[in-house]
Amino acid sequence: MLIDVRRELRTALDDRLAASARMVAGLVMQMPRESMVVGKPMESALDVVARDGLACEVSLLRGEVTMQPVARTTSSPGLGDVQPGYSTRSFGGKLWRTYVLQQGGIRIATADRIDVRERLLRDIALTAGIPFAAALAGSLLLLWFGIGSGLRPIERVRAALALRGPSDIAPLPDTQAPPELRPLVDTIEHLVGRMQDAMARERRFTDDAAHELRTPLTGIKTHLQVMRLAARSADGAPVAQQALADAERGVLRLQNTLDQLLLLARLEGSLQPAPQGRSFADVAAKLAIDDAQAGQHVKGRVRLFLPNRTIALAVPESLLVCALRNLLDNAMRFSTVSSEVVLRVEMHENQTVAFCVCDEGPGLSEVDCALATQRFWRRGAASQGSGLGLSIVSEMASRYAGSLQLRPRNPVGLEACLTFPENSDTQASADVAPASEH
């Protein structure tokens, strides 16, 4: 930019030389030739030459090579041999920029010193550059203060986070951020909150695993010790076989508890939206019945009642089958072997689908129904199961806009209803008809 300005200024000064020569030529052309006395200089121009380094010389042309000076400035370096047009010449150890104009038998030569010209260029550059530089510096300073003031809340957040220990995930202090930075601060606070929830779930899973796995592991260890002692005696084979069977049951219980813990941790700990899927009520119900009866080593104990049309749900089939299997497993475990368990699929007027599992077991009180979906809740110390089945069903239902309700039946038994919104635009009657018995 500065180079371009200097080039434009040099061009303007050259134009000034040419304009001066044309102006002098115009004045001379208006004067009568008889008034031009040879050798009589224009003394009024002396102060001008001394002041700004300008020189001018007027000559009459006599033929093609003869030239008679008629006027010149006292400090003129002698411009008689300078070619027409622009040129740069050295006179007396100083560089001059010259311009020669020949017009109507008159030769006008103008010149200015290069050092005076460069000094003028420096003065102009300083005059124009200093205010610009001052304005630029002031703008940068104001910008620096403005950005620093605007980002000060972020710096407070950074400093607060830098001072925290690895386990400190408390909410961020109030930063008083401006509206423009509020979304960023909110995002950081949301991230810290998610980390806090994740660490809480991790601690809870660790505590639950340590609490629930200790008993089956201790039982397995005891059964193995009994089997080892029985193997040393001659008649200890029956005892060893029984201890081995007890150890195998302990392993199965341990495996079931681990599976339930991992499934519940995945449901509770997922930070992503619930995975989308599609399932059909009749297919999921039949698969859940098959799985539950296979786990209990029974057949034909569960009866299924379905509406007279196909019902689609926006729930992955694997999760729906898992939830129904847990409800059926609880119903069969806590009721007598000879009693019947009923799974009824019902359509409601508010476009929801209910899977109701009814048993004839001892049931639960209203208070126990409210507590039964808590993790590891059992009605008594001797109760079977991991205490996680209903927690898993409740968590899965909440992730898909559903609900789980437990109600005591009269006179005995328990009804567990798992409800989801229907994923279908069709309308049909919700008349119930018995389906194939399982």
Image (cartoon, rainbow, N blue to C red):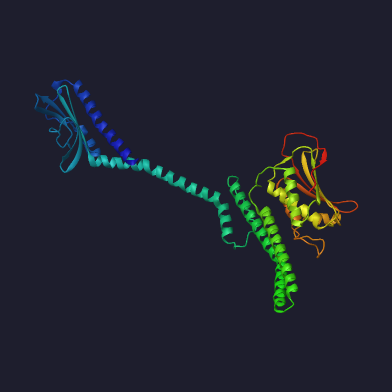
x%, y% of residue 270?
A: 65, 52
Can the viewer see residue 11?
yes
x%, y% of residue 62?
A: 9, 24
Which residue, as the protein is rendered here, is positioned at the far right?
411
Task: Judge left or right: residue 322 versus residue 366.
Answer: left
Q: Nearer the viewer, residue 252 or 181?
A: 252
> Which residue is painted at 76% across and 57% down in the image?
297
Against 230, residue 159 (above or below) is above
Which residue, as the protein is rendered here, is positioned at the far bottom?
233
Q: Nearer the viewer, residue 143 or 311?
A: 311
For the image shown, how many numbered marks are present on the structure?
0
Can the viewer see residue 55?
no
> Which residue is painted at 66% across and 54% down in the image?
266
Against 378, residue 417 (above or below) is above
x%, y% of residue 209?
A: 69, 63
Task: Judge left or right: residue 336 versus residue 375.
Answer: right
x%, y% of residue 195?
A: 63, 56
Quarter of the image with the N terminus in it:
top left
Q: Quadrant of residue 59?
A: top left
Against 288, residue 307 (above or below) is above
Against 61, residue 249 (above or below) is below
Q: Quadrant of residue 198?
A: bottom right
> Which residue is painted at 91% across and 52% down in the image?
411
Task: Judge left or right: residue 408 versus residue 72.
Answer: right
Q: Nearer the viewer, residue 374 or 141?
A: 374
